[in-house]
């Protein structure tokens, strides 16, 4: 059977609880959202990944729903290996060609690592992110006890192996189905033992595993320390004509005219989309959704906005605030302001308090003043890792 596409499996079945909390640590809050939500956003938002499945532990359905909403999931087994196997069996029904297997305890995953892993699968059955070992490594002196220094272990050729680990799906599924040895340390070793080649690609310090309660504070600090604020603007105009519906801010507004354009012509969502694309220097709405492409005729502009937001989150960005100004003589925006804020917030998975909707007229001057069109301008403010 032909296999196509790339799937991702997030292993989130651990029962370990952050000290002081009651939720398993993968659902505990880290840098403003549940830990698992960071890696889920990075994987689900990556353009090369088609499907994401989460393997959770027994009884964790409610915690998952609270963290991510209604997402595809399986109930894992009593070991990490069995949880991965359950996830792979669920993915097998979709015949993916490649799979990334990731631990939820490594939340800060950026798109560059995913790109390197997928590229390495062109010539290998598997690929893992790896970092060099910087510290001196030594054994304790077995004759003198645990607290006595013994021989140094040469660190040449040693690597710290991270996740996600990427595989050709057939290779890792066969390795898991046929596994009969001791509990393996990771999926890559299983593929190796089955005869597959596994490449080392450059890992990322931000992917450090969160194991102990103290790791939360360190990860928060590392994450926050690397974040930089960026703001960018967007601007759009569409013509007001008779016989069109008026969509503004994702809300259908009763009016005697509507906006004309290739899509639904929602100037507000277009301006916000351009502002978000601006924060990551990703061109503009026309770059991603060319007006010459017939598939966007009459399109719901919500999808443009969601795409721009997913590009931001894929890069590890956090959207902090959107400020929108609508420029028109009519209709009156006030009665629709709350609905627009709620709709934009829902599309961006933000709180309504993070969305500002303002309106002004131009004192009957110019095209907006004459009611020939509506203009919108927006500014988006995000935080993103500084080097990206
Ligand atoms: Mg437009």
Image (spheres, rainbow, N blue to C red):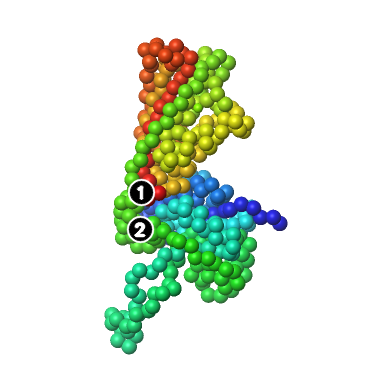
> Which residue sits furthest right?
1
Instruction: Choose top left, top right, bottom left or bottom right for residue 121.
Output: bottom right
The picture places residue 330, in percent across and down from the top left corner, at: 44, 15
Please tell me whether residue 253 is drawn above or below residue 25 in the rendered image: above
Q: Is residue 49 visible?
A: yes
- The residue at 53%/75% (across/down) is 182
Specify whether 149 is left or right of 241. Answer: left
Q: Residue 54 or 112: which is nearer the viewer?
A: 112
**SS at badge 2:** loop
The residue that appears at 43% across and 40% down in the rendered structure is 281
As displayed, is residue 273 above or below residue 99?
above
Tell which of 350 and 139 is nearer to you.
Answer: 139
* Label 1 element class: loop
| Residue 58 appears left or right of 325 | right
Pinpoint residue 143: horizontal percent, then vertical percent: 32, 88
The CA distance from mark 1 to mark 2 is: 28 Å
Q: Residues within 10 Å of mark 1 (few under 14, many from 20)?
A: few
Q: Percent position (x, y) of residue 197?
A: 57, 68
Q: Residue at x 33, y 51 (%)?
A: 226
Mark 2 sits on what residue?
Answer: 18
Quadrant in the picture for residue 214? bottom left
Q: Residue at x 49, y 59 (%)?
A: 164
Q: Is any part of residue 62 visible from this angle?
A: no
In the rendered view, tell whether residue 157 sits above or below residue 31: below
Q: Position of residue 78 (x, y in %)?
A: 51, 65
Quadrant (top left, top right, bottom left, bottom right) of the N terminus: bottom right
Residue 386 image label: 1
């Amino acid at each position: 059977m032909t296999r196509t596409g790339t799937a991702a499996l997030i292993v989130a079945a651990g029962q370990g609880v952050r000290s002081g909390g009651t939720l398993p640590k993968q659902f505990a809050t880290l840098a403003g959202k549940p830990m698992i939500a960071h890696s889920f956003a990075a994987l689900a938002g990556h353009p090369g990944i088609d499907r994401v499945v989460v393997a959770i532990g027994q009884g964790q359905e409610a915690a998952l729903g609270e963290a991510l909403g209604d997402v595809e999931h399986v109930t894992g087994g009593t070991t990490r290996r069995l949880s991965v196997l359950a996830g792979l069996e669920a993915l097998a029904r979709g015949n993916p060609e490649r799979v990334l297997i990731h631990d939820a305890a490594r939340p800060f995953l950026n798109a560059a690592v995913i790109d390197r892993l997928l590229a390495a699968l062109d010539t290998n059955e598997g690929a893992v992110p790896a970092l060099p070992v910087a510290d001196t490594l030594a054994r304790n002196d077995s004759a003198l006890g645990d607290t006595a220094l013994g021989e140094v272990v040469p660190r040449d050729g040693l690597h710290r192996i991270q996740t996600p680990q990427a595989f050709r799906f057939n290779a890792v599924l066969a390795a898991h189905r046929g596994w009969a040895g001791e509990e393996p340390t990771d999926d890559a070793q299983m593929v190796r033992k089955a005869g597959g080649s596994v490449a080392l690609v450059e890992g990322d310090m931000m992917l450090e595993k969160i194991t102990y309660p103290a790791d939360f504070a360190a990860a928060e600090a590392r994450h926050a320390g690397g974040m930089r604020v960026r703001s960018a603007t967007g601007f759009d105009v569409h013509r007001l004509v008779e016989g069109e519906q008026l969509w503004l801010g994702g809300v259908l507004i009763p009016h005697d005219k509507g906006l004309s354009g290739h899509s639904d012509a929602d100037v507000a969502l277009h301006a916000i989309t351009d502002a978000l694309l601006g924060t990551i220097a990703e061109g503009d709405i026309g770059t991603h959704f060319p007006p010459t492409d017939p598939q966007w005729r009459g399109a719901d502009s919500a999808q443009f906005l969601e795409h721009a937001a997913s590009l931001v989150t894929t890069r590890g960005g956090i959207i902090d605030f959107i400020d929108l100004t609508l420029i028109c003589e009519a209709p009156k925006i006030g009665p629709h302001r709350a609905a627009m804020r709620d709709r934009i917030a829902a599309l961006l998975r933000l709180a309504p308090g993070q969305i500002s909707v303002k309106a002004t007229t131009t004192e009957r001057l110019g095209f907006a003043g004459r009611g020939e069109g509506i203009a919108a301008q927006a500014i988006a403010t995000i935080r993103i890792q500084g080097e990206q």
